């Protein structure tokens, strides 16, 4: 079983600096989206759908879509260019290894660990059941919260370190809409807390400012 990621101490890598507005917070990029209006109606539980199944399906979709985006960026996210798993100008994430020690990993290694661990969980019938009348385990809510925090860190790294490449691909409306949907769903079903999105005041998560801006714009619910 792969070790679990934790939040670490100050640090930085390519992307926005502490004293400069990041590209994803600048217009017109902050406004770029495929979906207009509030995401509340999109994430609402449909009638006659079990909430566990709804969460499971959406987790799978978020994981799959984010994995596809990151796959396009792998040539830019290397051991050399992203020597740490940065999520903001003063934030690096560390990994807890088998000895329960926090270790700093290059972003591609860290993200590979995250995506592999999530894929293993999705493939596990005891965690994500696919057979009729098979119930979800009582630990499912805790598991999906852990998955959500992991995916948030991948989003945070891409925005911080690779948003110029997103712009080069002209994919910012798609990526922004995916992330806004992810945030709206996470808040609606209590998979993310505000502190997860904002981070510590001394080591803020870069995309925390994006969440606040989209909330002000009415894209996300307060």
Image: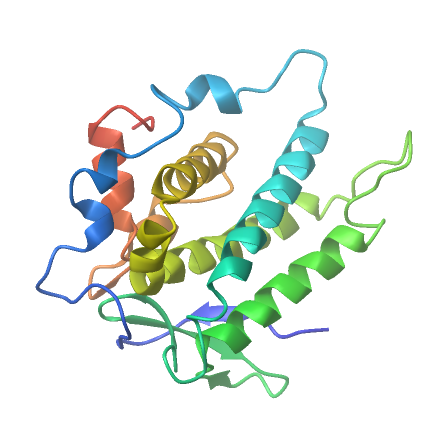
Residue 96 sits in which quadrant? bottom right
Q: Is residue 133 above or below residue 201?
A: above
At which x and y percent is residue 26? 16, 45
For this orientation, the residue located farthest to the top is 47
Q: Is residue 210 above or below residue 166?
A: above
At x 27%, y 77%, the residue is 11
How is this picture coloured? Answer: rainbow
- In depth, the one of 98 and 77 nearer the eye is 77
Residue 140 sits in which quadrant? top right
At x 65%, y 52%, the residue is 143
- In depth, the one of 3 and 161 nearer the eye is 161
At x 36%, y 37%, the residue is 173
At x 57%, y 45%, the residue is 65
Q: Quadrant of the C terminus?
A: top left
At which x and y percent is residue 57? 68, 35
Left or right: where 204 falls relative to 92: left
Q: Is residue 215 above or below residue 153?
A: above
Q: Tag count in the figure?
A: 0
At which x and y percent is residue 124? 82, 54
Q: Is residue 123 above or below residue 86?
A: above
At which x and y percent is residue 188? 47, 30
Q: Quadrant of the N terminus?
A: bottom right
Residue 27 sits in which quadrant? top left
């Amino acid at each position: 079983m792969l070790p679990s990621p934790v939040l670490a101490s100050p640090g930085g890598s390519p992307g926005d600096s502490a004293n400069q507005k990041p590209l994803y917070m600048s217009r017109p990029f902050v406004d770029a989206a495929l979906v207009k209006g509030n995401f509340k109606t999109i994430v609402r539980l449909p009638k006659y759908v079990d909430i566990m199944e709804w969460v499971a399906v959406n987790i799978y979709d978020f994981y799959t879509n984010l994995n596809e985006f990151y796959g396009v960026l792998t040539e830019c996210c290397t051991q050399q260019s992203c020597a740490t798993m940065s999520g903001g100008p003063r934030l690096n994430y560390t990994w807890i290894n088998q000895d329960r020690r926090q270790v700093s990993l290059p972003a591609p290694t860290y993200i590979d660990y995250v995506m592999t661990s999530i894929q293993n969980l999705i493939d596990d019938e005891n965690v994500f059941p696919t057979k009729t009348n098979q119930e979800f385990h009582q630990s499912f809510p805790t598991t999906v919260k852990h998955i959500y925090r992991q995916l948030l860190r991948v989003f945070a790294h891409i925005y911080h370190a690779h948003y110029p490449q997103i712009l080069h691909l002209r994919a910012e409306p798609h990526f922004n809409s995916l992330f806004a949907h992810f945030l709206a769903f996470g808040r609606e079903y209590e998979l993310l807390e505000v502190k997860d999105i904002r981070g510590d005041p001394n080591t803020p998560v870069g995309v925390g400012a994006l969440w606040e801006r989209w909330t002000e714009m009415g894209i996300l619910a307060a």
